Every structure is written in C-alpha cells, then in structure tokens.
Amino acid sequence: MRAIRSLNRLLPLALTALLTAASAWAASPPPLFSRTNLVAWCIVPFDAKARGPEARAQMLDRLGLRRLAYDWRAEHVPTFDAEVEAMKRHGIELTAWWFPGALDADASNILAVIERHGIHPQLWVTGGGEPTSDAADQTARIAAESGRLRPIARAAGRLGCQVGLYNHGGWFGEPENQFALVQQLRADGLTNVGLVYNFHHGHDHLARFPELWRRMQPHLLAVNLNGMIAGGDATGLKILHLGEGDRELELLRVIRDSGWQGPVGILDHRPETDSEETLSRNLRGLDWLLRELDQPGSGGPKPTPPAPPPTPPPVAPPTTGRTDLPEAFGAALTGGAVVRGDAPFPTNLYWQVEDPAARAALPEFETVPAAESSTLTPANGHPQMEVHRTWQRSHGNAHGARFSALDQIHRGNVTNLQVARTYRAGDGLGNLQCNPIIVNGLMIAPTPGQHLVGVAAGRRFVVVPATGGGKLGSPPGDAYVAFALPSSAPH
C-alpha cells in the first residue's frame, strides 16, 4: 500500500513535467532555416509536371518540407478542397494562400474553403501602380489602397487569418509604401495586416536592404528567398537557385543576425522545370549558404547554374540559283526565294547580290499576259464571314481585309458612344502608329515606352518588355511574344 501511495504522489508530478515540456516545445519555433520551417512557393502553376494535389503533397513529403504557400490559376479552383485535404493527410501546413486584390467570386470561394476546413493561412495580396507625383498624390494613393485592402482584412480577421502585403513591383511593391499602408490599416483597428517580402522582387532594394529589414521586421509575416545578383531582374537573371547569386549570403546574414522568426519560402517559379528538381536545387544551395554563414569557406564548391543548351551551328548560305526560271534570270539569282516543300531550293529569305553580267543579259522589258478565266481558282466561300468577327493580327486577319463584320456599333448609334474606360500606359512619350490586335477579348498593343500591354474590360494585365535583349527569356532583336496574366497571378 505504501508503494501505491508513493506512486500516486509521483504520477501528478510526472504528468506536470510532461505538460511543461510539451508547452515549451510548442512555444519554441523551429530553427529559422530548418526544413520544417521552409515554405514551398510558386510550385502549382509553375510545375512542368502539372502535379495534382496528392502528387504535390507526396513530393513535399519526399523533400521533408512541411509547409506550402498555395498559388493557383483558374484551372485549380475546382481542386481547392482536394488541395487542403491532401496536405492534411501528409501533415503539411497550408501556410499561405495567394489571394485576389478584391473580394470577388474567387475570393469568396477561397474564404469558404478556409472556413470549411478550419485552417488559418496567411492571405497574400499584391497591388501595383505608378510612382506618385507629390505628397498629395501619395496621400490619395494610401487612402485608396487602404480602402481596397480594408474589406479583405476584415474578412480575413473573421476567420482568424492574417493578410500579407506582397511586394510585386510598382508603387505597391515599395516597402516604404507598404509601411504606410500597414500604419493606416492599424489606425483603422485592423491589426491582422503585415508584410511578405520577396527577394525576387527586391533587386532595387539590395543597397538599402539592412535598413529596410530593420523597419520591416516588426510587421513581417514571411520572407521568400531567391538567388540574387545586382540588376539580375534587368538581365534575364531574376530567378536563380539559392547559392547561384552573389548577394543572398549577405542578405541571409542580416536576417539571421536580426533574430526574426517566421516562415521562410523557397521558390520554383520556372514553368519549364520539374518543381521537385528546382526545390531540391534550392535546398542544396541553402545548405551551402548556411555552412558559409557558420564558417566562411566551409561550404565547398559554390553552386553554379545549369549550363545553357549548346548553340546550333550556323547554316551556310546557299550558293546556287533558281533552276526553274529562264537560264539568264535564274543565274542572276544566287539564292533567296523560298519554295515550300521544294528541298533543292534555298530556304533563306534574303537574295544575294546579282551577277552583273547575267543582269545585263536580261531583256529590258518582258510582257506577261493576263491569265485566262479558265485558269483562275473558282470562288469557294472563303474566307467565311466568321473570320471577320475577330481581329487577331494587323489589318484584321491574314487577308489584310481591314474589315469587321461586328454590327453592334453602326452609323446609326456611333454618335451615342461614351467613354467607359481609359487605359494610359504612362511609360513615355511618343507617336504610336500601330494597329492593336484583339485575341479572346484581350486587346494587345504597344506603349510609348516600348512595352506590350494586354488590357481587358474590368481586368488589368501584366506589361511585358518589347525590346528583347535577353529580358524575361526574350528572343534576340526587337521581337517579343505577347502574353498577359491577371494581376492576381504571382511573378
């Protein structure tokens, strides 16, 4: 009996010790750069393997990552619930959710999913805007942007979620402007708003990063890492694996030495690669950086970017002329005309310099008789009228007809038109003499600042540099393939 009484006295003490240890463990955050604190980001629409929710959760499990920031596109909306359920099955926290810039139908759907599953992710919200011109313009911008964010913050607060202002370039992406917005919203009683800082949108901040970090730290909800070199965003090196840049080591030292604790994101953001391989390279690069932080020179060989694909050998210009023309004329051309499907003939588009002697042998005039009607191609009903209801290239279509069959606006009502929406690029001065095109309801046109911009009613689209020069993977020269993304899409 004496032993039982002793045991009864010991059990409460043991239980108290266990509960105390558990509480201390729960209160202690994981080490800042540990695998369990890292957040996979930009791995949903950017995954070349286009994984579904379960496959994505299994991938994160294999990598030892326990957190996901969920970015999405329209095609992922039907799988929102499946995404949450897959992550729960694998013990992966949905740390953040990319959120629209207004409480639209998508936003309402996301909030419903969050409430249904009882999760509390950060809601990452972005914005844009040109720089303000003066103090009055700045005051008005802060009032307008805080007014846009206020209902989002209130809706998030009702579900126990925080709102992270995500730097994505433009006025909204400058930390000083985000500080002002947080201050204004907190003055309105909304204390669930903070910042999400992204290295890959902060190349212009490198020189002042230590001071910016000091000011961001009290408001910071998360930080997303990236390999960094000065000016990388302007030279096609915006997205690099960790360790492949030359500035991220000093940035990590500032973060580590500050004592800040919070989620740390690592990126994929490469639609052409398998997200598992990209995240693995970032994990290896982060390991190298951490060894260098602890002891400079101990990291081993520095990570290097993958070698670019080999340049194909140049094609030698043709040296023979067209053989299907009169001898004198054919000999005068040393290459250039294209005959599709006719392999023996040259395939370059430039004619060589003519042979002067062969040129001189040509007759001064040559009469070409008109074709007889029997040799003409009979009408076949093409192009059909539906072709004239789009405007997908300059002058309307491949026929250059400059004709539209749309009849909603006509001579009887054109004088009643009123301005409904005006788009101003605001990126330069110039005289544009161009013909915009319209594809799937999106108008694509150049701007005076040599960008391509896509604009649609009620939506804003990303402006894309039009000058090439290696930016954003553009081809050489002045050509650029136009594309557009909704402002809610991450970059």
Image (cartoon, rainbow, N blue to C red):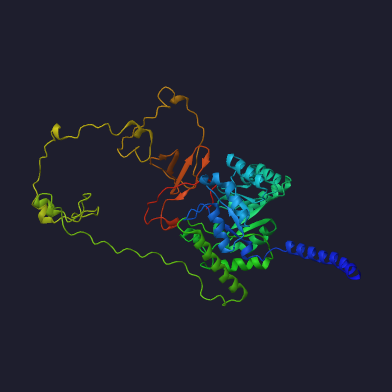
For the question of whether residue 133 can be seen, the reply is no
Above or below 488: residue 271: below
Q: Which of the two residues, 122 or 170, is positioned nearer the viewer here?
A: 122
Q: Quadrant of the N terminus?
A: bottom right
Q: How many marks?
A: 0
Instruction: Tell me which residue sits at (61%, 50%) in the image.
Output: 85
Q: In terms of depth relative to the viewer, which is nearer, 231 or 160?
A: 160
- Tell me if 203 is positioned left or right of 4 in this view: left
Residue 20, image x, y percentages: 80, 64
Q: Quadrant of residue 474?
A: bottom left
Above or below: residue 457 compared with residue 328: above
- Above-or-below relation of 196 to 24: above
Q: Residue at position x 66%, y 60% from top?
A: 262
Image location (x, y in percent) of residue 87: 60, 54
Between residues 254 and 114, which one lies in front from this camera angle?
114
Q: Which residue in the rendered view is the most extreme toward the right?
A: 2
Viewer-proximal residue among 49 and 415: 49
Would you say 170 lies left or right of 258 here? left
Left/right placement of residue 290 relative to residue 325 reads right
Left or right? Give the position of 324 relative to 410: left
Q: On screen, 218 above or below 461? A: below
- Which residue: 36% across, 65% down? 310
In the image, residue 398 lies at what x, y percent?
31, 40
What percent of the width, then of the height, locates residue 413? 44, 23
Q: Residue furthest top?
A: 412
The answer to whether residue 276 of the structure is visible from this angle is yes
